[in-house]
Image (tube, rainbow, N blue to C red):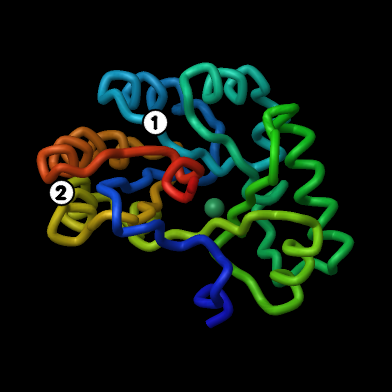
Amino acid sequence: MFDRLPGLLRRGPSTTSRVALTFDDGPDALTPRYLDLLDDLGVPATFFVLGEFAAKRPEMIREYLRRGHQVAGHGYDHTRFTKLSRRQLLDQCSRTDQAIGGQLSGQPWVRPPHGSLDAASILSLRAAGYVVAMWSVDSCDYGDHDPAQLAERCSPSKVSAGDVLLFHEGQEWTLEALPRIVTALHAAGLELVTMHDLFAR
Ligand SMILES: [Zn+2]
């Protein structure tokens, strides 16, 4: 399992009370509702966006940032990085970074589509200076459309300090589950931060 190799960000320090919410595959038509909901809940998140979608909705990229969220790349068109040559992989990442715009101060971040990595793609990303962001708790919201099940999978009994929670954009059931998840994590004394802040020293 290459995604278990050290050096990939999967889980932050357990010495704080922080956890991170992350949302993949946007931006899309439901993004404004995700942003309004997160505003209502008062929590920041990290959005791993597709370059082709970011290029179509540049105003949404600005809106993520304006509301205090972290934005990073998730490939240009969601092709698995393991299916790409080194040149194609870096082309996908740089085109996505361009679509995100000038927000990438410091080291660029990327989350591989499907979490698919191999030794070659990891080496290519590292050589190009990318922080490779994985996750430690999968809500499974891509396949499971039951908000109650999503909330259970992300309940305080399953989540602890340092965890990175994986969700996806564009899904009504994810929106429905989020208030319950955030309320329960807050009640358990956990603070929700961006993935960048979770790993900041
Ligand atoms: Zn994805």
- Residue under the image location 65 percent in, 24 percent down: 57
Q: Residue furthest right?
A: 87
Q: Mark 1 points at which residue?
A: 44
- Does 159 appear above or below 37? below
SS under mark 1: loop
Report the disc number at residue 95: none
Residue at mark 2: 148
Tell me the crowding category of disc 1: few under 14, some 14 to 19, or many 20 or more residues within 10 angstroms, Cα based: many
Q: Is residue 105 above or below residue 20?
A: above
Q: Which residue is at a point 75% across and 55% down the rendered structure image?
A: 129
Q: Confirm whether residue 140 shows in the render.
A: no
- Foreground of the two, 187 or 79: 187
In the picture, residue 25 is in which quadrant?
top right
Residue 105 seen: yes
**Residues under labels 2 and 1: Cα distance?**
22 Å
Horizontal and vertical percent for residue 113? 59, 58
Q: In the image, 39: left or right of 113?
A: left
The percent position of residue 18, horizontal first and vertical second, equals 31, 46
What's the amino acid at mark 1?
Pro
The answer to whether the residue labelled 2 contacts the one labelled 1, judged by CB atoms less than 8 Å apart, is no
Binning the other alpha carbons within 10 Å of mark 2 as few (below 14), some (14 to 19) or many (20 upward) gives some
Q: Position of residue 184 (x, y in %)?
A: 13, 42
